[in-house]
Image (cartoon, rainbow, N blue to C red):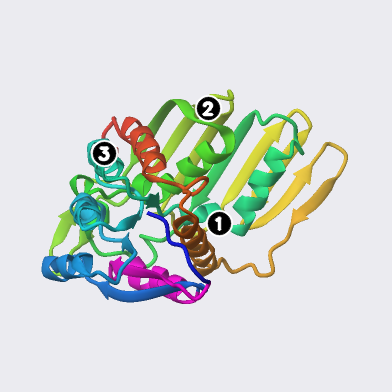
């Protein structure tokens, strides 16, 4: 599927999702030149989803439903002849992800993964610094991201706390971190991990307490084909939110990311390599930048280097192996 024409020819987008899809993705596409959102529907209304996929004035279906609905919605969109952008964590497990990959491959349609954090300004710059060899060949990465997102205030029980529905912090946030690791340091060849569930019960909207079967934090130890080791420690249920910290070491020094700021330590001095305009993290800008990436991939008929279903499957396979041990309270 290739969209060719003038710059006035808009990529017409149908969005499934009233959460992230409506609040962030729809405005991102609407504010991107050459894109137009034709409708946003709730994933819980199957008739609305079917009607959206049946429309002839849609070029791309952007799926931002919960992961337990990804397979159903991706299948429907592709069988209706549309290119697809699917949010992470790309289904409930690797089995779902493989089926979606097969469906897209057999149809010969563009199929993208919403790894919009590849467009975060600090991650783009960090990857460039690593690729440019500022610290030499990278050797080790330590990544800490401790947030209070599900604890302060206490988030009610929902699918994100249900293992069987595709919930869990590893899937929700770890998918982005694993994707960055693969994208920057090479394919992940070895892994081990520990899941944890700090808050084991949460109130449901019906007033009843529900047991949490999915993790709200994890530690992952990874090794890539380039022999880079990575340790990722992350939680959504920390008592306070701290700025995320990434430390990448190599024979010539270390690159440190605190929040969005990047500094280089070379043994003699510390040098600012990137200082953001604001200390407030902006979730909208990476998604808008990514919308332009998707637009260009559709117009030019080439997906590389845009993240695809294959990238989503690779991440899910890593996460499934990390999740092999049950969450520990």
Q: Residue 231, image x and y in percent?
A: 52, 34
Q: Which residue is mark 3?
A: 102
Q: Which residue is mark 2?
A: 224
Badge 3 density bin: few <14, some 14–19, many ≥20, Cα 10 Å: few
Badge 1 density bin: few <14, some 14–19, many ≥20, Cα 10 Å: some
Q: Earlier in the sequence, mark 2 or mark 3?
A: 3
Q: Which residues are magenta?
A: 7-31
Q: Residue 151, image x and y in percent?
A: 37, 60
Q: Dots 3 and 1: beta carbons under 8 Å?
A: no
Label annotation for residue 119 = 1
Badge 2 density bin: few <14, some 14–19, many ≥20, Cα 10 Å: some
State whether residue 36 is above or below residue 250. Answer: below
**What secondary structure is marked by label 3?**
helix
Observer-nearest of 14 and 97: 14
Q: CA distance from mark 3 to mark 1?
A: 27 Å
Q: Residue 220, image x and y in percent?
A: 44, 35
Residue 312 placement, left or right of 295 = left
Query: Is residue 110 at all visible to an observer of this figure?
Result: yes
The residue shown at (44%, 58%) is: 298
């Amino acid at each position: 599927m290739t969209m060719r024409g003038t710059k006035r020819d808009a990529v017409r987008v149908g969005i499934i999702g009233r959460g992230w899809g409506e609040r962030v993705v729809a405005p991102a596409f609407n504010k991107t030149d050459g894109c137009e959102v034709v409708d946003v529907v709730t994933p819980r209304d199957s008739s609305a989803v079917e009607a959206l996929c049946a429309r002839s004035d849609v070029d791309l279906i952007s799926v931002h439903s919960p992961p337990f609905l990804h397979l159903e919605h991706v299948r429907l969109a592709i069988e209706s002849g549309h290119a697809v952008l699917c949010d992470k964590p790309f289904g409930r497990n690797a089995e779902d992800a493989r089926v979606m990959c097969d469906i897209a491959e057999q149809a010969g349609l563009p199929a993208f993964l919403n790894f919009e954090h590849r467009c975060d300004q600090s991650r783009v710059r960090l990857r460039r610094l690593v690729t440019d060899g500022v610290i030499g060949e990278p050797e080790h990465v330590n990544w800490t991201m401790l947030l209070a997102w599900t604890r302060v205030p206490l988030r009610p029980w929902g699918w994100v706390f249900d293992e069987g529905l595709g919930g869990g912090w590893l899937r929700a946030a770890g998918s982005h971190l694993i994707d960055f690791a693969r994208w920057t340091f090479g394919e992940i060849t070895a892994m081990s991990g520990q899941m944890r569930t700090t808050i084991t019960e949460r109130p449901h909207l019906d007033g009843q307490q529900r047991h949490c079967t999915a993790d709200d934090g994890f530690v992952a130890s990874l090794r890539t084909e380039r022999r880079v080791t990575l340790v990722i420690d992350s939680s959504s249920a920390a008592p306070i939110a701290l700025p995320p910290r990434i430390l990448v070491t190599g024979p010539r020094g270390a690159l440190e990311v605190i929040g969005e700021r990047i500094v280089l330590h070379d043994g003699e001095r510390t040098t600012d390599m990137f200082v953001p305009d604001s200390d407030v993290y902006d979730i909208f800008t990476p998604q808008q930048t990514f919308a332009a990436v998707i637009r260009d991939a559709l117009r030019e008929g080439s997906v590389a280097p845009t993240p695809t279903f294959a990238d989503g499957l690779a991440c899910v396979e890593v996460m499934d192996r990390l999740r092999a041990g049950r969450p520990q309270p």
